[in-house]
């Protein structure tokens, strides 16, 4: 039985509305040039008023299914990685499952913030191997961060855009596929990225809304230090554990957090043959969507050739980090 699981198709969706730096700069008390200098971001996309996370996710899912040549009824699992769900319950994946007609599928959400998509990839791969039926899974990263931003907080309001990316996983030929993953949590740093209110510890109330405690908050400098310290070590561990030479990595797709940060991270990694794929300059930080959107752009654009190895590297709230190696 074939337990080699890989990518059968990719898809992505970003909203139509383009938001330039000038639009987010004034409320945050900065100017457009400051944003580009500090983040490398020029543009981002924002969801329409009638679009929720599941709407973006379903659009990306349909495109991934079409690329894979599969029908939604062929899918046995729908996983949505998001930290901006449609509502606290049920899972956003349930809305997506219904919308696309994946009538044979289980549906579940994963919240590892911006690391969520790579977490979801690893979980979906494990499901398909355990199921052993040769079926397929739909893995989606989707976020609508524009709904939880404080427009006056320059540490966050200038960074984020909305979007969704998806892959279909299923059996592939030996020598291809998703062949290694490394997931790691660092819960002692849970306060670096957070939305404080709306859960069981601090339920929604008039006071929490008034105090802005439903907004996304991030300690940007500490996050950058965390990424610089943790991600290179984990990459080296992953490559050593699977005897993968660094020079064999041809493509590096990191979480699109901040363009300046990505430049720093690439300089800390010893990947001499790797092309780093970046879209943060025109899409902003799209949360759990950022890696699958960048992967879809590279996959569909034929920038990743047959047999080439791709390293995915995510980091996000929790704090969490997640890496994966796949071969086209």
Image: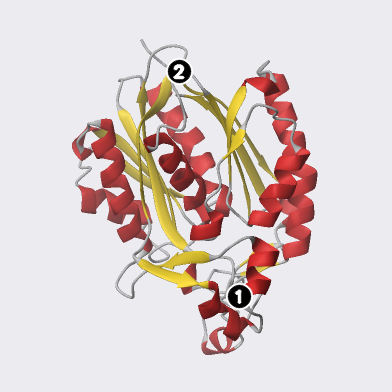
Can you give x and y, in whole percent of width and height, for residue 111 in the image?
52, 52
Q: Is residue 312 left or right of residue 239?
A: left
Instruction: Say few, some or many: other residues with alpha carbon within 10 Å of mark 1 (under 14 / 14 to 19 / 20 or more).
Output: some
Q: Residues within 10 Å of mark 2 (few under 14, many from 20)?
A: some
Residue found 65% across the figure and 48% down from its top: 320
Q: Give percent across and percent down for residue 28.
A: 62, 81
Residue extending farthest front: 33
Colouring of the image: secondary structure
Q: Secondary structure at mark 1?
A: helix
Question: Is disc 2 placed on a helix, strand or loop?
Answer: loop
Residue at 40% across, 53% down: 164
Quarter of the picture holding the C terminus: top left
Residue 243, compared with residue 230, is above or below; it is: above
The answer to which quarter of the image holds residue 212 is: bottom right
Mark 2 vs mark 1, foreground winner is 1
Q: Where's residue 67, x and y in %?
A: 28, 35
Whether 222 is drawn above or below 146: the answer is above
The residue identified by callout 1 is 32
**Front-lying residue, 139 or 191:** 139
Q: Which mark is residue 176?
A: 2
Q: Quadrant of the N terminus?
A: top left
Q: Is residue 38 left or right of residue 6?
A: right
At horizontal 54% and vertical 85% (from top left) the residue drawn is 209
Residue in the image at 75% along x and 41% along y:
267
């Amino acid at each position: 039985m074939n337990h080699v699981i890989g990518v059968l198709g990719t898809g992505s969706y970003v909203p139509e509305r383009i938001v330039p730096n000038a639009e987010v700069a004034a409320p945050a008390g900065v100017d457009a040039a400051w944003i580009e200098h500090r983040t490398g971001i020029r543009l981002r996309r924002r969801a329409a008023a009638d679009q929720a996370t599941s709407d973006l996710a379903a659009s990306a899912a349909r495109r991934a299914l079409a690329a894979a040549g599969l029908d939604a009824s062929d899918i046995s699992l729908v996983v949505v990685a998001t930290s901006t769900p449609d509502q606290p319950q049920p899972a956003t994946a349930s809305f997506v499952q219904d919308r696309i007609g994946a009538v044979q599928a289980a549906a579940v959400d994963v919240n590892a913030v911006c690391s969520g998509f790579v977490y979801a990839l690893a979980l979906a791969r494990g499901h398909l191997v355990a199921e052993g039926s040769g079926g397929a899974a739909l893995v989606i990263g989707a976020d609508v961060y524009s709904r939880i931003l404080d427009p006056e907080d320059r540490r966050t309001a200038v960074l984020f855009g909305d979007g969704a990316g998806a892959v279909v996983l299923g059996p592939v030929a030996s020598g291809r596929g998703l062949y290694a993953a490394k997931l790691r949590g660092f819960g002692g740093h849970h306060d670096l990225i957070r939305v404080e209110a709306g859960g069981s510890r601090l339920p929604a109330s008039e006071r929490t809304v008034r105090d802005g405690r439903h907004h996304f908050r991030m300690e940007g400098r500490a996050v950058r230090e965390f990424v610089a310290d943790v991600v290179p070590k984990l990459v080296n561990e992953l490559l050593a554990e699977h005897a993968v030479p660094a020079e064999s990595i041809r493509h590096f797709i990191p979480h699109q957090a901040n363009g300046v940060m990505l430049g720093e991270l690439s300089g800390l990694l010893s990947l001499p043959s790797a092309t780093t794929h970046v879209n943060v300059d025109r899409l902003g930080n799209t949360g759990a969507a950022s890696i699958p959107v960048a992967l879809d752009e590279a996959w569909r654009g034929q920038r990743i050739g047959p047999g080439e190895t791709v390293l995915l590297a995510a980091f996000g709230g929790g704090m969490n980090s997640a890496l994966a190696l796949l071969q086209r």
